Image (cartoon, helix red, strand yellow):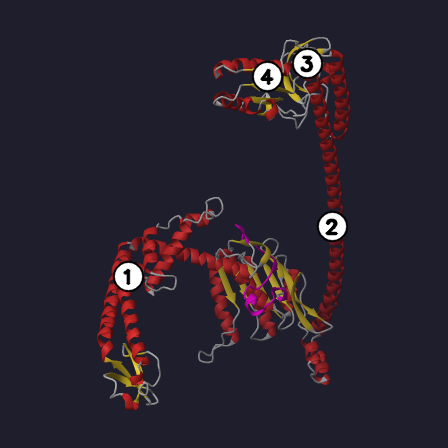
């Protein structure tokens, strides 16, 4: 079992070391810990070779073990075969108790009836509990059983040898194992902390240098274990150390004062120990000392009273407290005469506040409530109480003292009315007036809290409505944007359709040129004018839809970078005439009207152009230019020179596509030409011609 534990630790360590998720970017602290792990892949492989998933020794742990187990299997089969044949013999039909092979004293035997032991030659290995059967080992399987037992002993010895070798190998790596174990302990601790923090719905606290404490919607961490639903845990909020150094918590018995006190201390220590805490928002100062006086340690043996026990603890607090101390005291001033106890408690609070310590106490004493309301560095707090139901709500309210409601609770629990009435008469009038004032204050506070809650609810509702309106506005903007994009897409598609019509007209002109050896210049001019007008209308529509603002270029001069709107190109001015300018863009010089030249708009990058844009460069139609270039019989180097010249001229003449005749042959020239096209920015696409027009012997080139 210990070896298996080592193997499991080695396997976990190796898995952590190679876990790519634990990277310096994702988990820097965890990565710094796991980077100390020693790689033990070879030892893990040894464990995997020896043990199976259930922790049993594999047959393949060693060649010797494998041989032994094979021999055991063969021997066991021979024993079964021999015993089963005996069970089937008619001579022993009345002798055998039951036709089964069983195992006794490390020997395979068969059950024989009491009277049949003498008829079957063999060794008796005991009797059944009922006494009706004897377990007999027939002489015919004695040697086989002996061999099986011998093999079992050899198996044990081989397993012992294998495990001893593995143990010695682990000893040789004891330093690495110890180092890995230390790392795994850290990871295991962090994992336990993380799982616990997740179980209590914890958040990361903000640790600050000042000795202040701010908890918003805090929950006692131990209540998560006792209450199934975390929603049933009533949160509390408090602040101490910024404006106030002391808080006096008062209120009814069993109202949650002590639980709140303990939760405050526990949450602070958890945060300063590096744990997340079940608090929605928190700021925890660097308190260097904690002092508490919560449990009643009255001792009969030591004759120490409750008050004496408090005094002993308070003396220790007086000695050790300073400005970085957090002090929690439950029921300060109790266990003695109320007047003297209250005076002593006030004196304690004054002394600790003077030391700049942060003090939180619970009390029922009115004198301390008055002290907290009058002292500039002290604040009252109370546990809320439902006056109608006479039940605590376990909610903490800052800024208000709480009433104990002792006589109201006594009346609710059916104490005699005359006793309750007499008790009210005996109460000091000032105390009674204070108690009634606290009740009225509590009622007013509850009323104000309800109004504030309603206001917050309405405010949240308005925020939700505003957020809904903002979302609707965003949705409408998105719809408008999508409609614009759709319209732009339709415009682009229409331009593409115009391009196809233009290509068709060009194809017709090519056919005319081939058959009649002439081109109708008027027809070319009409086609280009029609395409230009259609494109101009589409561009105006696209401009209306586009969010890009176009500003006409001013002060044109050589070297200025400009935007050619009709071509959607960015270029550099080469020279300027009266109404036109020569602009270099993407390796070509264009003669452009000044009215088509703009400042480079935002969102347009250098080199942007649209595939379906028609490029207009002033050039006369070259009647000697052919729609097809014949490169057959040339080397690639020779063909490349002719090809580049031909492509340049085709682009200047505004040809959308041309044909390159290279022949089929070995395919060498075709492959090199097409490889050349892949890196040529002037080429939009290329493909083999249809079979009836030359197939792979001709490449059809689409020009930009």
Local packing at callout 4 (Cα closer than 10 Å; few below 14, some 14-19, many 20+) is few
Asked which secondary structure carries label 2, the reply is helix
Region in magenta:
204-232
Say which mark, if any, is on residue 515: 3
Residue 148 sits inside the magenta stretch? no
Residue at position x 73%, y 42% in the image: 474
Numbered label attached to residue 463: 2
Sequence-first tag of 2 and 4:
2
Q: Is residue 216 left or right of residue 168?
A: right
Among the two numbered marks 1 and 2 on one chain, the one whose residue lies closer to the N terminus: 1
Residue 350 % position (x, y): 57, 61
Rounded to the nearest angstrom, the CA distance separating label 4 from label 1 is: 77 Å
Front tag of 4 and 1: 1
Quarter assignment of residue 237: bottom right
Between the C-alphas of marks 1 and 3, the distance is: 90 Å
User: Which numbered disc, 2 or 4, marks the residue closer to the eye?
Assistant: 4
Left or right: 535 in relation to 9 = right
Q: Position of residue 301 (x, y in %)?
A: 44, 80
Quadrant of the rendered image containing residue 158:
bottom left
**Alpha carbons under labels 3 and 2: distance apart:** 77 Å
Q: Observer-nearest residue: 370 or 637?
A: 637
Q: Is residue 229 magenta?
A: yes
For disc 1, the marked residue is: 66
Q: Please provide percent x and percent y for residue 580.
A: 71, 11
State the residue position of label 4. 587
Residue 328 in view (yes/no): yes
Q: Residues within 10 Å of mark 3 (few under 14, many from 20)?
A: few
Nearer to us in this view, 85 or 414? 85
**Mark 1 / mark 3, whichever is N-terminal:** 1
Depth check: give the residue in front, 123 or 619.
123
Q: Whole-Å distance between the Cαs marked 3 and 4?
A: 35 Å
């Amino acid at each position: 079992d210990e070896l298996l534990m080592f193997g499991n630790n080695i396997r976990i360590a190796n898995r952590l070391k190679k876990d790519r998720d634990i990277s310096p970017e994702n988990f820097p602290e965890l990565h710094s810990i796991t980077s100390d792990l020693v790689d033990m892949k070879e030892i893990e492989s040894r464990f995997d070779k020896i043990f199976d998933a259930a922790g049993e020794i594999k047959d393949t742990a060693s060649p010797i073990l494998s041989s032994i187990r094979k021999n055991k299997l063969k021997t066991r089969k021979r024993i079964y075969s021999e015993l089963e044949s005996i069970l089937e013999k008619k001579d022993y039909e009345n002798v055998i108790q039951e036709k089964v092979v069983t195992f006794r004293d490390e020997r395979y035997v068969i059950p024989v009836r009491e009277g049949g032991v003498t008829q079957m030659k063999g060794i008796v290995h005991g009797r059944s509990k009922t006494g009706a059967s004897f377990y007999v080992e027939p002489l015919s399987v004695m040697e086989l059983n002996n061999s099986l037992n011998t093999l079992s002993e050899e198996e044990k010895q081989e397993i012992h040898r294998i495990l001893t070798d593995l143990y010695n190998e682990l000893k040789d790596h004891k330093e690495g194992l110890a180092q890995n174990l230390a790392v795994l302990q850290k990871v295991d601790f962090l994992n336990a902390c993380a799982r616990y923090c997740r179980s209590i719905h914890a958040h990361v606290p903000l640790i600050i240098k000042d000795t202040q404490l701010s908890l918003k919607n805090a929950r006692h961490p131990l209540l998560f274990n006792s209450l199934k639903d975390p929603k049933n845990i009533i949160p509390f909020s408090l602040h101490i150390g910024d404006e106030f150094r002391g808080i006096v918590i008062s209120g009814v018995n069993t109202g949650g004062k002590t639980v709140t006190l303990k939760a405050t201390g526990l949450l602070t220590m958890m945060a300063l120990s590096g744990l997340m805490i079940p608090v929605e928002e928190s700021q925890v100062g660097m308190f260097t000392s904690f002092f508490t006086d919560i449990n009643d340690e009255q001792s009969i043996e030591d004759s120490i009273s409750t008050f004496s026990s408090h005094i002993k603890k308070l003396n220790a607090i007086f000695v050790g407290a300073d400005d970085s101390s957090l002090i929690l005291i439950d029921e300060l001033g109790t266990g003695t005469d109320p007047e003297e106890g209250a005076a002593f408690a006030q004196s304690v609070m004054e002394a600790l506040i003077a030391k700049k310590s942060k003090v939180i106490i619970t009390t029922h004493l009115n004198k301390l409530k008055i002290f907290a309301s009058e002292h500039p560095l002290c604040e009252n707090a109370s546990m809320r109480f439902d006056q109608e139901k006479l039940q605590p709500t376990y909610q903490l309210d800052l800024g208000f003292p709480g009433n104990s409601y002792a006589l109201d609770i006594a009346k609710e629990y059916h104490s005699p009315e005359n006793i309750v009435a007499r008790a009210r008469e005996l109460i000091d009038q000032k105390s009674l007036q204070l108690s009634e004032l606290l009740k009225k204050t509590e009622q007013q506070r509850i009323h104000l809290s309800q109004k504030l809650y309603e206001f917050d609810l309405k405010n949240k509702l308005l925020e939700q409505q505003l957020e809904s309106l903002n979302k609707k506005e965003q949705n409408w903007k998105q719809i408008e944007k999508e409609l614009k994009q759709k319209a732009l897409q339709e415009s682009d598609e229409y331009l593409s359709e115009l391009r196809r019509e233009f290509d068709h007209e060009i194809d017709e002109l090519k056919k005319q040129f081939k058959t009649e050896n002439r081109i109708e210049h008027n027809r070319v001019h009409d086609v280009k004018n029609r395409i230009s007008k259609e494109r101009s209308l589409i561009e105006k529509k696209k401009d209306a839809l586009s969010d890009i603002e176009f500003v006409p270029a001013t002060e044109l001069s050589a070297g200025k970078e400009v935007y050619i709107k009709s071509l959607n190109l960015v270029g550099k001015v080469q020279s300027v005439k009266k109404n036109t300018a020569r602009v270099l863009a993407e390796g070509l010089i264009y003669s452009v009207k000044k009215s088509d030249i703009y400042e480079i708009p935002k969102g347009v990058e250098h080199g942007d152009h649209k595939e379906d844009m028609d490029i207009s460069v002033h050039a006369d139609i070259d009647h000697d230019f052919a729609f097809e270039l014949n490169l057959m019989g040339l080397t690639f180097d020779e063909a490349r020179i002719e090809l580049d010249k031909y492509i340049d001229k085709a682009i200047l003449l505004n040809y959308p596509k041309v044909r390159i005749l290279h022949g089929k042959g070995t395919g060498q020239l075709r492959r090199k030409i097409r490889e050349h096209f892949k890196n040529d920015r002037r080429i939009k696409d290329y493909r083999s011609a249809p079979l009836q027009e030359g197939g792979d012997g001709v490449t059809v080139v689409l020009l930009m």
